[in-house]
Image (tube, rainbow, N blue to C red):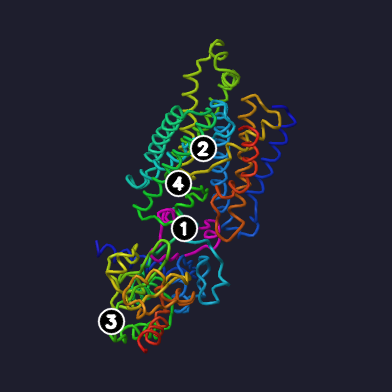
Amino acid sequence: MGKLKNFSFLFLFFISIFLKGQRIISFAPNITETLFYLSYDRYLVGRTSFCNYPPNTDKIEIVGSFIDMDFEKVISLKPDIVFFSGNLTDKSEKFFKEKNINYFDIKMEKIDDVTKGMDSITKIVGKDYDTSKVEKVKNKITGIKKVKKNEKVLIEVSEKPFIIATSSSYIGSILKLFGFEIFEDEKPYINFSYENILSFKPDIVIFMHSFKDGKVKYSILKNFSKVRFVFLDDEKIDIFSRPGPRVIDAIDIIERDFCER
Amino acid sequence: MKGKKLLIFLTFFLLTSFIYIDFKLSSFENDVKIEIIKLRIFRYLLVILSGMVLTSSGAVMQVLFKNPLLDPYVLGISGGGLFGFLLSSILFKGNLLISIFFSFFFSVLSALLSLSFSSNIKSDRKVSILISGLLVNILFSSFVILLSMFSKRDITFLFYALMGSFNHVFISKNLFLYISFFVTVILSTVFIIFKSKELDIMSIDEDIASTSGVNVKSNFFLILLIIIYQTSVIVSFVGMVGFVGIIIPNILRMAGILKNRDLILGSFLGGASLILVADFISKYSFSFEIPIGVVLSIFSLPFIFWIVKNNFE
């Protein structure tokens, strides 16, 4: 099965080499950011309404989002390659198969997936790119040092419903590399409860949403006065929720705001 | 229908059809224009068929139940159909034939539930059928949400399923199935048009209908079964689309079109035109597509309020 996957991957790679001018559509913000970072933005002809970084993206046509794709716009842009990032739906897959358009679902869920995803994208696009940029990301990740021990971090993603990011999430996997203790679960995002707060006893709570009164519920903790609450702004929320080249910024933020106190 | 009224409806329908297919077509390059037209025509056919079927079904149901506020959505048939469709798409990975069968089965079940609840509510029949339909709709909508959560579907999928969308992907290998379903839906509507004389008599009084030789019960269930079939096919393609079956037939009655044959024919053109306009708004208003039900609900609410005000004390 693995060999078959590799073979089909190579086959599509060779097809992509023979395509004259690549026209790429990205259906995920982190893929768009990666394409820009690798200087593939000159091939990018379509993006979703959620793709808002870097600022130059506003010059690229919007083709809906991964769930409500504008099929007419997609066809009119004549794409050679369409990228998803773990968000390929059955409906989209049906459409691209029907129209014989190459599509790739590059799953980038944890910090380890960032460089793997970059490698996959460069192989698929098959054009020149600055290899030093990928190396820079790799070095930044491998350069993370475990500086924290036994400090528990709870990452609140939404207040209602109460959802947290676990160690399997992107932000969770980064913080874990620094030595923080993150709520363990196989799923990246899970429902949480007051009972869970009491049993986990976090030292730091990170809010990845704009509901400022969210910290009230943590007053049930005995060490409430010692708990550190961190509210991320919209830009930082994007940085910590989009596995891509801005992992460099994410690492810098953690080193600056969480490790040096 | 008198010639002048028919001409107005036909002109409006043709005009909306032309705008729908031709909109900004010149902005596309020639080599993709054919593909765009193909996409638009498939969507256009789905839109007009849905408009025709849902509106004529609404018109007929209003006669069957003597209630101006009924359509397949209000009776809970659409909710049951959507649940059946979703269940089969999870169990059988999207086999269209099985999906429509499931959709039909659960639509029948939801209609039976509505009728059974209604007969047990001690109230005016007009009100009891609305309440029971509402309950069944809530029940099946909840099942749809539960099923979506179990199958880990994205929350936006639910918006489009519960509020309807014509952004459907047509697959060429299913072309024969599409044609078969569409033809059977059209033929079944033609059958209802042939039954319009019986409907006319049934709409006056059931006793008069019986003495006139019309088998009220068998006609009632036969026509209801046909409507359920039509609705389950449409729901399988576009999700739940409500209220269109209420607005158009009531406008037609206000315009003096009372004969059921004319009402169904008028509903065909009126329903298709209304849905075309609504889908146009949903498609082009923003950078993302609004579910069709949202557009219809916003624009039809004042009118439905007016119908309630004039029909219920």
Amino acid at pointer 1:
Ile
Give the label, 1 or 2, closer to the camera.
Answer: 2
- Verify CB contact (< 8 Å) between mark 3 and mark 2: no
Q: Which of the chains bears the disc numbered 2?
A: B
Q: Is residue B100 magenta?
A: no
Residue designated by label 4: B172
Left or right: residue A250 versus residue B311 is: left
Residue designated by label 2: B74
Left or right: residue B123 versus residue A17 is: right
Per the model, the C-alpha gap separating discs 1 and 3 is 36 Å
Residue designated by label 1: A67
Residue designated by label 3: A179
Give the label, 1 or 4, closer to the camera.
Answer: 1
Q: Which of the chains bears the disc numbered 1?
A: A
Image location (x, y in percent) of residue B211: 55, 10
- Image: A231 above or below B196: below
Q: Is residue A83 magenta?
A: yes
Near mark 3 (Cα within 10 A), the count class, few <14, some 14-19 or many ≥20, is some
Q: Residue at 37% of width from left, 84% of height from top?
A: A258
Amino acid at pointer 3:
Gly
Amino acid at pointer 2:
Val
Per the model, the C-alpha gap separating discs 3 and 4 is 53 Å
